[in-house]
Amino acid sequence: MAYKTVNPFTNKEIKSYVSLTEREVAEKIDQAEVCFEKWRKTDFATRRAVMKKAASILREKKGEFARLVTLEMGKLISEAEGEVDVTAEIFDYYAENAEKFLAAEVLKPKDGKQAWIENEPLGIILCVEPWNFPYYQLVRVVATNLMVGNVVLVKHASIVPQCAEAFEKLMLNAGAPEGAYTNLYVDSSHIGKIIEDSRIRGVAVTGSEKAGSSVASKAGESLKKSTMELGGSDAFIVLEDADLDQTCMWGMWGRMNNTGQCCVASKRFIVMDSIADQFLNKLVEKFSSLKMGDPMDRSTTLGPLSSESAAKDIAELTKKAIEHGANVVIGGKRPEHPGAFMEATILTNITKENPAYYREFFGPVILFFRVPDEEAAIKLANDSPFGLGGSIYTKDIERAKKIAKQIDTGMVFINKPTWTAPDLPFGGTKHSGYGRELAKEGILEFVNRKLIYVN
Ligand code: NAP
């Protein structure tokens, strides 16, 4: 796919970019390799200064960075500003904590000799990233890897080329040497060839199952370590005693944040029968009050999807779900509105035979299920090819903790949808991928845990 900015609010093309040739990519890898040999020898203070500077530039130019996100993928401007803030926080967090996470680990072998593990950089890490959080997805792999002493090559999604360019400039302006952070405008079909290059030492992907499986198999063939942050279909489990107003607020946020285009969005609402009608009515009321419009306008609460094709895909998936017996409570189709819009939708009566049952809905559509009891809720939550996040709503925290242990996902939150923070590890299981980003778990993904032993 060619790199272009198409404003999803108007569907007008604004700017396009020429993809790199194979030769240009080879030159960028050469440059990254030269940089790595120097960067790996820098001390933490040098790396920390770059991270701190990047955070301060982001804060200073928050408006500019946020505007590009809204322009290219349609995120509400206030959410785009929030993304710039969290990106800066992550830079700060790894500036301050990476050294501690990467400290040598002393071992106590049975023979009484001296032994320890050093966490050493690996080299060039290739990162394939999605458009839904055009900066936050990058900082997760950039702040961690640069603090380790690795360098990164980043293939960003083709619909956010200006954000990709802005991030590369940000790193250079923050003092990162050329080659430490390299933006690659390359077609995804070119990725396999890049992975084969012996200087690429690891591959991190955030994206769909399809992209993940293609890149993971290539990385496997070349014996490269990989991490996969893929799709999800998080359960939002509401127990009988939940505070329904508060839970409804979280349900709206969990599903509608970023117009429903989050890997950890609350996609399947699993609600106890006894309170299901009451809860559904509250959700419908909230959904009806959404204001569709320009994502740059601060009064808009329902923006466009990231692209016309994303809007078509979710509308098609919804249509198929309805054809296979799902009931529409609200929404259900594309609105009479120019741009990449989809109505905020709630579907019920989704049976196991419905192809929608096992699919990820990447947009403003709730799949609403009623269950008789806790056991049925857990069974339904786990009946998914995905295993990313999920959440449970109740006043009985001890009960929620027991349920959380039975949910087969990488993350379970209680009384809040699964979300992210600089110091919490993020990642999934099953088709949601493997490996973790962020926190100590994330920073140790692409290091050589080298054993040193003294006889
Ligand atoms: P996508 O189509 O897989 O794209 C993600 C990235 O992968 C883009 O840079 C894309 O490039 C590239 N790509 C696509 N196919 C590829 C291939 N065969 N080989 C190499 N690279 C390839 O995913 P998306 O639709 O943009 O993003 C939505 C998906 O990402 C959802 O499933 C969502 O749940 C998941 N996601 C997961 C997380 C997480 O942390 N677990 C976070 C955010 C999103 P082009 O743009 O050039 O096609």
Image (cartoon, grey):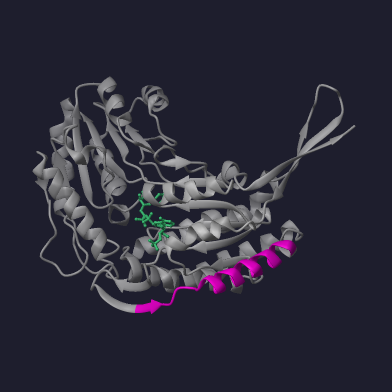
Q: Is residue 2 above or below residue 314?
A: below
Estimate the x, y position of residue 143 in percent, counting from the top left.
59, 57
Please say whether residue 341 is visible from this viewpoint. Answer: yes
Q: Main secondary structure of the magenta part?
A: helix
Q: Which residues are magenta?
A: 15-37
Please say whether residue 284 is visible from this viewpoint. Answer: no
Ligand 1's quadrant is bottom left
In this rendering, would 64 be left or right of 178? left
Picture residue at 33% right of the left edge, 65% below the top: 73
Instruction: Please tell me which residue lies in front, 200 or 361.
Output: 200
Picture residue at 28% right of the left edge, 52% below the top: 260
In this rendering, would 307 be left or right of 185? left
Q: Is residue 83 magenta?
A: no
Estimate the x, y position of residue 157 in percent, counting from the top left.
41, 63
Instruction: Please tell me which residue lies in front, 52 or 33.
Output: 33
Count numbered badges in the picture. Answer: 0
Indicate the quadrant containing the N terminus: top left, top right, bottom left or bottom right.
bottom left
Q: Quadrant of residue 295?
A: bottom left
Q: Quadrant of residue 335?
A: bottom left
Estimate the x, y position of residue 77 in percent, counting from the top left.
34, 66
Indicate the quadrant containing the C terminus: top left, top right, bottom left or bottom right.
top right
Picture residue at 14% right of the left edge, 67% below the top: 337
Instruction: Please tell me which residue lies in front, 452 or 330.
Output: 452
Picture residue at 75% right of the left edge, 42% below the top: 104
Furthest toward the bottom, the residue is 15
Q: Is residue 20 magenta?
A: yes
Instruction: Please tell me which residue lies in front, 198 or 176.
Output: 198
Estimate the x, y position of residue 221 in percent, counting from the top left.
54, 46
